[in-house]
């Protein structure tokens, strides 16, 4: 997927903010930072008294073993010391204070010099909540439904429909990123009274770089109620690291005010996001919204983590299947084109005449071979002098490997006059110094992008240059994009490199 805008809608300012060192947590749980050897409590969130009926100042500098059952202390020691696990470790921990036992669902983070515990009360299932067995049954049903999806679009639509039924969120969307980190809602299931975002695009600044990085470390991001008062960590600095505590992979990490305002502007009270990851990179998000506060049980959150993993693997499989199919199609054309090329005394004739030409291989509107000062063309191409201008630009910019662009006029000003034939360019260097290239051209494709709000007003800065706000409106805002072509795919680049190698081999053969 590639949203055909040439503008950069990412935000360097938002993307540079240290969200992981925010030093605040959401109040539906609390955090303890422990000395690794002694399990001494060295830092905690100030809201601990809301859960343990003992003040933060009383707990600070105490050993965890004073309040937690001995067998669980041994479990913590064992799980943080064996195998050097540095990933999150789920556990159940019981505190006993004044003869009152309180159970918590815990996530143990084993750091180099300390242990961080995230704790949330173990609550009985609320009315209407599914237990683990029923959640498992629903997941197996969803997995069976996925097998019926022959495209990513169908897969994602099944996913959002079933996740909405399973979780009870008012809206569930799947949001896919393009290469510039703008995103498009490709699937949606929602209540009728909500505004639909299906097929709308959102600028990269909506999920800036620092937030995208954190999604690679967190299986989900839950905000049960945007109208919360965060709890601070005390003391401010972690006495063990002598720095702010890194909350990168903490579920309880508080959210930047600008994001809470963003949810408010959308009319959303609670949200949850789960990453879809392909090849260790963020492919997209499962994004859930609710009009009123909504807390998800540990079982339901676990289901989201599992579904995210399953959807990620299905996306990889579907994209690989599509890619392989496209490569096979191109290889078939390439084989026949190669035969034509070798059956001609002048191999260039075999590439521009016959049953197949370069335009079939490149899926282009035109192509040209520039070799030894001579130009051979096929299809809809720029004029000879215009092709020479392109070659001179390629030489000036030292293009010595496969080069593609879908908006040539943005990089080469004279290309504005021949955008009808060459808004898109793929260039195969044969001999840079001599200006020998094989070129594929794609004509201009005027497109209209439907944005969820004006992307030029995604962020509004206050005069102080520090305070900023998200846009107020998510009404459809249309942008007409000109001077662009269909984008070049990885498969296009792969087959172009195979052709370049074949041509170089033929040239070597012709010289002997």
Image (cartoon, grey):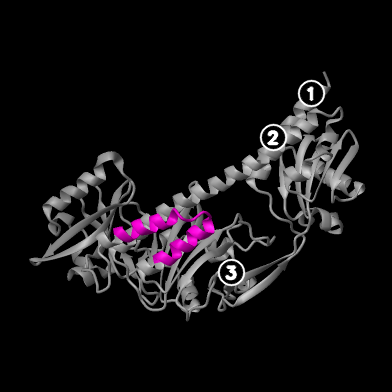
**In the rendered image, the vertical position of residue 199 relative to residue 239, given as above or below:** below
Q: Residue 270 sits in which quadrant?
A: bottom left
Q: Is residue 493 left or right of residue 273?
A: right
Q: Residue at coordinates 83% horizontally, 40% vertically from top-left? A: 352
Q: Check disc 2 and report the residue beneath it.
A: 498
Asked if residue 250 can be seen in this view, the reply is no
Q: Position of residue 409 (x, y in %)?
A: 79, 56
Direction bottom: furthest residue: 193
Looking at the rendered structure, the secondary structure element under dot 1 is helix
Q: Check disc 3 and report the residue beneath it.
A: 200
Looking at the rendered structure, the secondary structure element under dot 2 is helix
What distance separates the C-alpha of mark 1 from that of mark 2? 16 Å
What distance separates the C-alpha of mark 3 from that of mark 2? 37 Å
Q: Nearer the viewer, residue 213 or 269?
A: 269
- The mark tally for this picture is 3
Asked if residue 426 can be seen in this view, the reply is yes
Direction top: furthest residue: 512
Q: Position of residue 50 (x, y in %)?
A: 23, 72
Q: Is residue 339 left or right of residue 239?
A: right
Q: Check disc 1 and report the residue beneath it.
A: 508
Q: Nearer the viewer, residue 249 or 480?
A: 480
Q: Position of residue 453 (x, y in %)?
A: 60, 74
Magenta stretch? Answer: 136-163
What distance separates the C-alpha of mark 1 from that of mark 3? 51 Å
Say if the magenta span includes residue 252: no
**Counting other residues with Cα less than 10 Å from the Cα at mark 2, is it few (<14), some (14-19), or many (20 or more)?**
few
Looking at the rendered structure, the secondary structure element under dot 3 is loop
> Mark 1 and 3 residues: CB-CB less than 8 Å, in contact?
no
Q: Is residue 73 left or right of residue 356?
A: left
For the N terminus, the image quarter is bottom right
Q: Residue at coordinates 43% horizontally, 72% vertically from top-left? A: 289
């Amino acid at each position: 997927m590639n949203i055909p805008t040439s503008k950069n809608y990412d935000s360097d300012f938002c993307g540079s903010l240290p969200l992981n060192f925010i030093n605040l947590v959401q109040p539906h749980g609390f955090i303890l930072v422990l000395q690794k050897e002694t399990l001494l409590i060295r830092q905690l969130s100030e809201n601990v008294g809301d859960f343990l009926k003992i003040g933060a100042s009383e707990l600070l500098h105490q050993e965890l073993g004073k309040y937690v059952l001995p067998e669980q202390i041994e479990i913590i020691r064992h799980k943080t010391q064996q195998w050097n696990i540095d990933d999150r470790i789920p556990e159940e921990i019981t505190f006993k204070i004044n003869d009152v036992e309180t159970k918590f669902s815990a996530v143990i983070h084993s750091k180099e010099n300390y242990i961080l515990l995230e704790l949330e009360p173990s609550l009985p299932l609320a009315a209407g909540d599914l237990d683990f067995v029923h959640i498992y049954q629903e997941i197996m049903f969803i997995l069976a439904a996925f097998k019926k999806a022959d495209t990513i679009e169908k897969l994602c639509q099944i996913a959002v429909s079933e996740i909405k039924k399973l979780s009870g969120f008012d809206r569930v969307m799947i949001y896919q990123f393009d290469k510039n980190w703008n995103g498009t809602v490709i699937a949606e299931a929602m209540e009728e009274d909500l505004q639909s975002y299906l097929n709308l695009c959102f600028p990269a600044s909506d999920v800036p770089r620092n937030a995208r990085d954190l999604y690679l470390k967190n299986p989900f991001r839950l905000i049960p109620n945007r109208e919360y008062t965060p709890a601070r960590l005390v003391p401010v600095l972690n006495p063990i690291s002598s720095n702010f505590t890194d909350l990168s992979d903490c579920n309880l990490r508080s959210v930047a005010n600008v994001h809470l305002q963003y949810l408010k502007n959308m009319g959303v009270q609670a949200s949850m996001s789960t990453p879809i990851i392909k090849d260790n990179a963020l492919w997209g998000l499962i994004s859930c919204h609710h009009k009123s506060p909504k807390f998800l049980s540990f079982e339901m959150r676990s289901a989201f983590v599992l579904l995210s993993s399953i959807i990620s693997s299905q996306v990889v499989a579907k994209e690989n299947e599509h890619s392989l199919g496209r490569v096979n199609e191109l290889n078939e054309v390439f084989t026949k084109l190669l035969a034509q090329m070798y059956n001609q005394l002048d191999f260039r004739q075999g590439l521009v005449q016959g049953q197949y030409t370069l335009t079939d291989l490149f899926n282009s509107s035109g192509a040209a071979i520039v070799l030894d000062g001579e130009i051979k063309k096929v299809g809809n191409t720029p004029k000879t002098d215009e092709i020479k201008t392109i070659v001179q630009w390629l030489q000036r910019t030292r293009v010595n490997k496969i080069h593609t662009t879908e908006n040539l006029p943005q990089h080469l000003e004279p290309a504005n006059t021949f955008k009808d034939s060459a808004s898109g360019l793929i260039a195969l260097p044969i001999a840079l110094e001599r200006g020998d290239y094989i070129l594929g051209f794609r004509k201009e494709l005027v497109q209209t992008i439907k944005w969820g709000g004006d992307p030029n007003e995604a962020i509004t800065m206050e005069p102080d240059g520090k305070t900023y706000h998200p846009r107020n409106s998510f009404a459809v805002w249309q942008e007409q994009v000109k001077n662009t072509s269909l984008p070049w795919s990885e498969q296009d680049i792969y087959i172009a490199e195979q052709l370049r190698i074949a041509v170089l081999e033929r040239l070597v053969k012709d010289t002997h």
